[in-house]
Image (spheres, grey):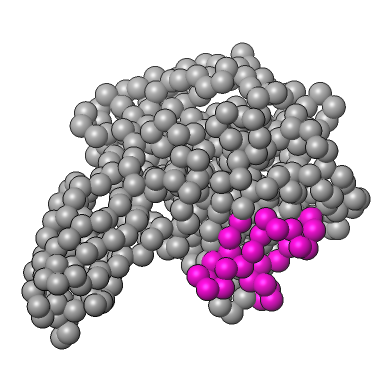
Amino acid sequence: MTTALAPKIFALLLAIAWLSRMAPAADTSRADASTYQGWQTLRLANPLIELQILPEIGGRIIQFKLGDREFLWVNPQLAGKFPEPNGLNAEGGWFNIGGDKLWPAPQGWDNDQQWPGPPDAVLDGQPYECETLAPGQPGEMAVRLTSRDDPRSGIRFSRVIRLFPGSTRVAFEVTMKNIDTKTRRWGIWSHTQLDGAKADRSSFNPLLQAWCPINPKSKFPRGYQVMFGEQDNPSFEADRERGLVHVRYQYKVGKIGIDSPAGWSATVNGENGAVFVQRFVFETDKPYPDESSVEFWLNGTGKIHAYNKDIVMPDNTVENPYMFESEILSPFAALQSGQSYSWRYDWYATQIGGDYPVLDCSEIGVTSEPLRAKREGRQTHLTGRFGVFAPGTVRAEFFDAKGKLRTSHDLLKASPLEPLVISTDLEPPKSATSIKLLWIGADGKTKGPFAQADLID
């Protein structure tokens, strides 16, 4: 920690500690002074998830956890270290410590309408101011991280991060302000680096996979565009039957962009079943950087064209580590001097129990195996696999052919820390023809349905 910043961080931690004491004790979100891999951090946590925030290096979230499962890649070569005062490494290059951060988009090296990083000395490498905010609801924690003014892009970033009690949801509101004297046009790029190694660190993790819905009216013939690397990279495929782009980590370098309107992408670590979800609102009437709302970059071997030259990626995990990037982008915002633009998105986390796909996603959770209801005599056998974003109770409701509710059953309680696997027999009325699954939160509020099916013979 730099000496000049230490008093500011100390004062912030005192304020956070005071707010934490004022919050309700049960199932609350908390903020504490912490350390992570040698850095002094701000820790926001509830009984389900944890964020480690590192204001001093680009206002990063350096780690995000579900229970004891870590999602984000952290550079072991730079753990606990700091860039030069200018935000770069000693050679003037990228001080890439990992984690999650904000960049302007689009990236490119052809003109001043493109962001030519990384590296980015100010937005990526220099300290952000950090302040606590008043909670919007009991048990909530919120902080604001604000960058320095960046003369190259002409902008200043500010990001509010909110953590809620009893949920894996993390809410973000990013504000981009034009601090230049001329109009600037950028999108906001949420850039998240995920750990691509096996748990034992012996190799890349071939069970690290991502899923994102295809746009049925996509601009791209394959439903996605290859932005870097070989056009036939086997890491990327369009699963037309399921309507999804499927990404499989194979340590082959490449990047794709997807013009997905669905507003979500999900990455699954099949080794342990942990799921990282990004949700946003797609704005159909606005242009996006790279014509994409979602992008995936995969570290690996191969060749790319970037920085106006061909680059061969080394087969060396020190220089080319196992890392998988899940990125979402805002629409373009053309800002006159002094104007600002704000963009909101959410993170969620859940558990699906192993190497399963994510076929659908809602505010309640994800679907890995759709709900099925098969009649077997007087019984109906229900099956399905899901992951939920908050603790609660699953309720089954049966309906007749006219849509009238005939009966309901509370099936089981579930948590984001465990997969929601349904395999049970119920005896609905003979008139029942369909079933819906609803979610009842710990607050007693009913949401959904999050799954439904016809009863089949």
The image shows residue 8, relative to residue 108, as above or below, that is: above
- Region rendered in magenta: 219-247
Does the segment drawn in magenta span residue 237? yes
Residue 448 makes an appearance in the image: no
Q: Residue at x 26, y 66 (%)?
A: 449
- Is 293 part of what is drawn in magenta? no
Q: Residue 286 in the image: state x and y as whole percent.
A: 59, 71
Residue for point 74% across, 53% down: 254
Residue 313: percent from left, percent from top:
82, 42
Toward the front, the furthest residue is 377
Asked if 40 appears above or below 317 in the picture, the reply is above
Left-right relation of 160 to 219: left
Q: Is residue 29 visible?
A: yes
* Residue visible at 65% across and 39% down in the picture: 204
Of 439 and 270, nearer the camera is 270
29 or 166: which is nearer to us? 166
